[in-house]
Image (cartoon, rainbow, N blue to C red):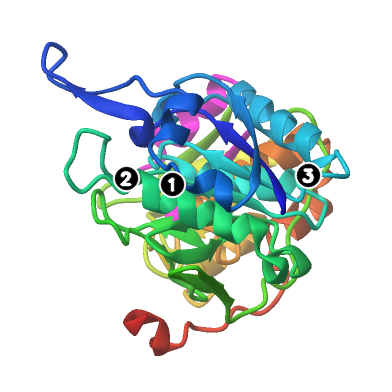
């Protein structure tokens, strides 16, 4: 029987409705969550690691490094075959990517949670916990070097592409550029795609003042200029469409670049990549000519994680650019997945 470390951190999966508070609050620790799935220990020899009850929206980089350390310490044991991280879904796409970037080994890290609290009649926590453990114990997954993946609602999503696409739907987590790696169907785990090359960085710290600035109608250079003056470590600009912004936003970024502050060029769209296709003032080509680094197909949120860790590792500009770039060509997802 496979031996799996399961790290509990809180989130909706741990919450119940509190009438006095007027909403869901975290109350279920690791032991209580395991009791919601009586048959889970029949699937694996579980090693519970309880890290409290922290809403995912409260996570700091220190929290994420603490989770990383707990996972890394567990996976370092020769008799541990994989890890499951249980957390809130608000920032799961960032947390999973953080873990993926820092995880060098072949043992899988499966991140899961729930979209409904334990008070809801359609509580999905037990099903997601079960699916996550099934994925972590799957020989096919353990042999595939998938890194960190997100498993909710029966799909297996790569950490570098998964996006929370809906605020409350069960199937909110989608890999919009490449599609999921596979599915959990009943007791079966089926991989239908390879993870392929992964980004990796070795560090125990992150730059704390890396900011994501999203371009919108009438967004000028004020946010970047103000944060630049306040001592920003770096910027990710989520530009409109294929990478375009107002000229004044670009001008503020150029001033930051001139002072040696790295700027990353991404798109605010949930899928696709910013490019250099437009050469009008503020167009994508002018951002790249100014020295902004391409985020590839990373969302702005994920590019911020990569930039913060890359700066924490002391990477030079060329190595930062390589960390952010797509490690392999991205192929559009097969429409088959929409019917799985």
Q: CA distance from mark 3 to mark 1?
A: 49 Å
Looking at the image, which residue is at 51% across and 77% down?
Answer: 277
Image position of 261 (left or right of 222)? right
Report crowding for label 2: few under 14, some 14 to 19, many 20 or more residues within 10 A (C-alpha): some
**In front of the other: label 3 or label 1?**
3
Tell me the residue that label 3 is attached to: 80
Corner quadrant of residue 223: top left
Q: Residue at x 42, y 33 (%)?
A: 35
- Residue 186, visible in the rendered structure: yes
- Which region is colored magenta? 219-239
Between 159 and 85, the one lying in front of the other is: 85
Of all residues, the one furthest to the top in this rendering is 20
Where's residue 83, x and y in %? 67, 45
Q: Is residue 117 above or below residue 267?
A: above
| Circle 3 SS class | loop
Quarter of the rendering occupied by the C terminus: bottom left
Residue drawn at 55 percent across, 28 percent down: 228
* Mark 3 or mark 1: whose residue is earlier in sequence: 3
Residue identified by numbered label 1: 249
31 vs 238: above or below: above
Measured in 3D between alpha carbons, the distance from the residue under mark 1 to the one under mark 2, in whole angstroms, is 7 Å
Residue of label 2 = 219
**Residue 283 numbered mark, or none:** none
Q: Specify whether residue 263 is in view.
A: no
User: In which quadrant of the rendered view does residue 285 lie?
Assistant: bottom right
Please check the rendered image and state whether residue 232 is part of the magenta-colored stretch, yes or no: yes
């Amino acid at each position: 029987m496979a031996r799996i470390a399961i790290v509990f951190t809180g989130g909706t999966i741990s919450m119940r409705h509190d009438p006095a508070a007027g909403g869901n609050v975290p109350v279920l620790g690791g032991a209580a969550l395991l009791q919601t799935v009586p048959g889970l220990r029949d699937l694996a020899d579980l090693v519970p690691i309880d890290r409290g009850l922290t809403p995912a929206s409260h996570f700091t980089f220190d929290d994420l490094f603490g989770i990383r350390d707990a996972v890394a310490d567990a996976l370092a044991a020769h008799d541990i075959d994989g890890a499951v991280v249980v957390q809130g879904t608000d920032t799961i796409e960032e947390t999973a990517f953080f873990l993926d970037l820092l995880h060098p080994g072949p043992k899988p890290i499966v991140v899961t949670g729930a979209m409904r609290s334990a008070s809801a009649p359609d509580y999905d926590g037990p099903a997601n916990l079960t699916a996550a453990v099934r994925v972590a114990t799957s020989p096919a997954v353990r042999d595939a070097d998938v890194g960190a993946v997100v498993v909710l609602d029966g799909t297996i999503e790569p950490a570098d592409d998964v996006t929370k696409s809906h605020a409350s739907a069960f199937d909110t987590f989608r890999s919009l550029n490449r599609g999921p790696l596979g599915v959990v169907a009943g007791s079966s785990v089926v991989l239908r795609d390879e993870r392929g090359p992964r980004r990796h960085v070795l560090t125990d710290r992150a730059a704390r003042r890396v900011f994501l600035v999203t371009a919108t109608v009438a967004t000028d250079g004020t946010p970047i200029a103000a944060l630049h003056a306040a001592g920003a470590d770096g910027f990710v600009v989520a530009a409109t469409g294929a990478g375009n912004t107002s000229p004044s936003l670009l001008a503020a970024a150029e001033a930051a670049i001139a002072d040696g502050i790295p700027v990353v060029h991404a798109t605010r769209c949930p899928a696709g990549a910013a490019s250099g296709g437009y050469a009008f003032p503020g167009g994508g080509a002018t951002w790249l000519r100014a020295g902004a680094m391409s985020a590839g197909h990373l969302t702005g949120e994920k590019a911020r994680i990569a930039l913060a860790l890359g700066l924490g590792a002391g990477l030079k500009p060329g190595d930062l650019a390589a960390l952010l770039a797509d490690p392999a060509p991205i192929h559009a997802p097969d429409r088959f997945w929409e019917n799985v």
